[in-house]
């Protein structure tokens, strides 16, 4: 049996708690049935790189990936621990647990691209949506325009003030020829395509459902110019949410070479949308 590697227990900070009206806000989250404002999955993902670099080596920053499905929400300073179990020469199973042993997220990590990643497997089982109201105008397969992206050093400094797992490459630009961007602002950089490919009708509350990041010619570093482009892969729904899967790629604008890629699933809460509430009231009359 493969040995499991465990990271330390950490208490992540909900750095978006003051974003009123969103899922990270206590009042909004509690109205939707959560214990409190939820911590973004991208913040939890920042606990994994030390384990991934320990297992795969520094090459993980150039061509590694991690692919996670989010199972349960956590709140500010709730203790969590990430774990890794080798699953082959260039692949591992990864997951995060809370103190009760419940899964917060689960998935896979790799050195090189993984056709059987957690997100790849879940995408194969996506069923077509029944009724979309918030995302009725979203179209699959249409590329966004190229969106300029530069991640300022200040965004790294802001993360280092609260990050659970600081690493030398986030501060020392000599290791990789620039300061490596931690996972949370790294993921945020890909999201510039969202307004172009995911038009949403009316106010909404969204939460991350799954994220895969894959370095293709990394790492991604601060103060360097990139362009992002993406498109929607699939739409679906559940009794409580409308669901969108999309892909976004960061490239070097001078060469056109892809540097990194993100595949992401978002859930939009039906209970937070007047489009659902008003039509349900009308149906009950």
Image: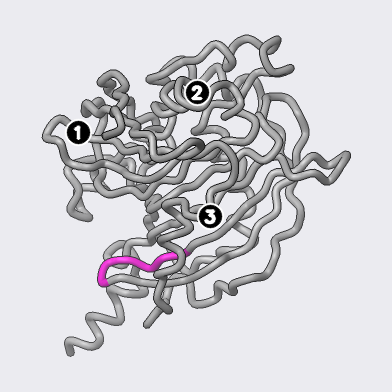
| Residue 26 seen | no
- Work out whether mark 1 precedes mark 3 in sequence or the reverse, and give the earlier one: 1
| Front residue of 22 and 73 | 73
Which residue is located at x 53 percent, y 49 percent?
114
Which residue is located at x 56 percent, y 66 percent?
233
Pointer 1: what residue?
98
Which of label 2 and label 1 is nearer to you? 2
Q: What's the CA distance linking mark 2 and mark 3?
A: 21 Å
CB of mark 2 within 8 Å of CB of mark 3? Answer: no
Q: Is residue 52 above or below residue 149?
A: above
Residue 70 location, x and y as percent?
A: 33, 48
Colour convention of the picture? one colour
**Which quadrant, please, contains the N terminus?**
top left
Residue 26 location, x and y as percent?
A: 25, 40
Q: Is 224 displayed left or right of 14 in the figure?
A: right
Q: What's the CA distance linking mark 1 and mark 3?
A: 29 Å
Residue 24: in magenta span: no
- Work out whether mark 2 precedes mark 1 in sequence or the reverse, and give the earlier one: 2
| Front residue of 11 and 161 | 11
Which residue is located at x 46 percent, y 64 percent?
123
Instruction: Please give the label number shown on residue 115.
Output: 3
Instruction: Please give the label number shown on residue 53.
Output: 2
Which structural element holds mark 3? loop
- Work out whether mark 2 precedes mark 3 in sequence or the reverse, and give the earlier one: 2
Residue 281 location, x and y as percent?
A: 22, 81
Magenta segment boundaries in residue numbering: 239-244
- Find residue 165 and report its image quarter: top left
Residue 240: in magenta span: yes
For the view shown, which residue lies furthest in the right direction?
A: 254
């Amino acid at each position: 049996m493969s040995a499991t590697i465990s990271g330390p227990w950490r208490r992540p900070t909900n750095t978006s708690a003051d974003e009123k009206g969103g899922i990270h806000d206590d009042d909004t989250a509690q109205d939707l049935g959560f214990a409190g404002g939820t911590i973004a999955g991208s913040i939890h993902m920042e606990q994994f790189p030390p384990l991934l670099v320990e297992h795969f080596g520094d090459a993980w920053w150039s061509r590694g990936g991690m692919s996670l499905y989010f199972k349960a929400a956590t709140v500010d300073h709730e203790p969590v621990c990430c774990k890794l179990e080798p699953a082959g020469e260039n692949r591992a199973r990864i997951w995060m647990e809370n103190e009760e042993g419940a899964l917060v997220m689960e998935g896979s990590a790799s050195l090189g691209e993984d056709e059987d990643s957690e997100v790849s497997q879940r995408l194969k089982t996506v069923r077509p949506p029944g009724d979309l109201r918030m995302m009725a105008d979203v179209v699959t397969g249409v590329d966004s325009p190229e969106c300029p992206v530069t991640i300022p050093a200040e965004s790294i400094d802001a993360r280092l003030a609260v990050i659970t797992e600081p690493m030398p490459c986030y501060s020392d630009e000599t290791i990789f020829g620039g300061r490596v961007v931690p996972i949370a602002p790294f993921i945020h950089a890909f999201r510039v395509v969202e307004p172009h490919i995911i038009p949403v009708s009316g106010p909404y509350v969204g939460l991350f459902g799954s994220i895969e990041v894959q370095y293709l010619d990394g790492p991604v570093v601060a103060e360097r110019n990139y362009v992002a482009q993406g498109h929607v892969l699939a739409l679906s729904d559940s009794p409580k949410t409308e669901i969108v899967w999309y892909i976004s790629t960061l490239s070097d604008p001078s060469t056109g070479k892809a540097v990194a890629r993100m595949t992401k699933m978002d859930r939009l809460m039906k209970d937070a949308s007047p489009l659902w509430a008003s039509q349900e009231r009308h149906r009950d009359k």
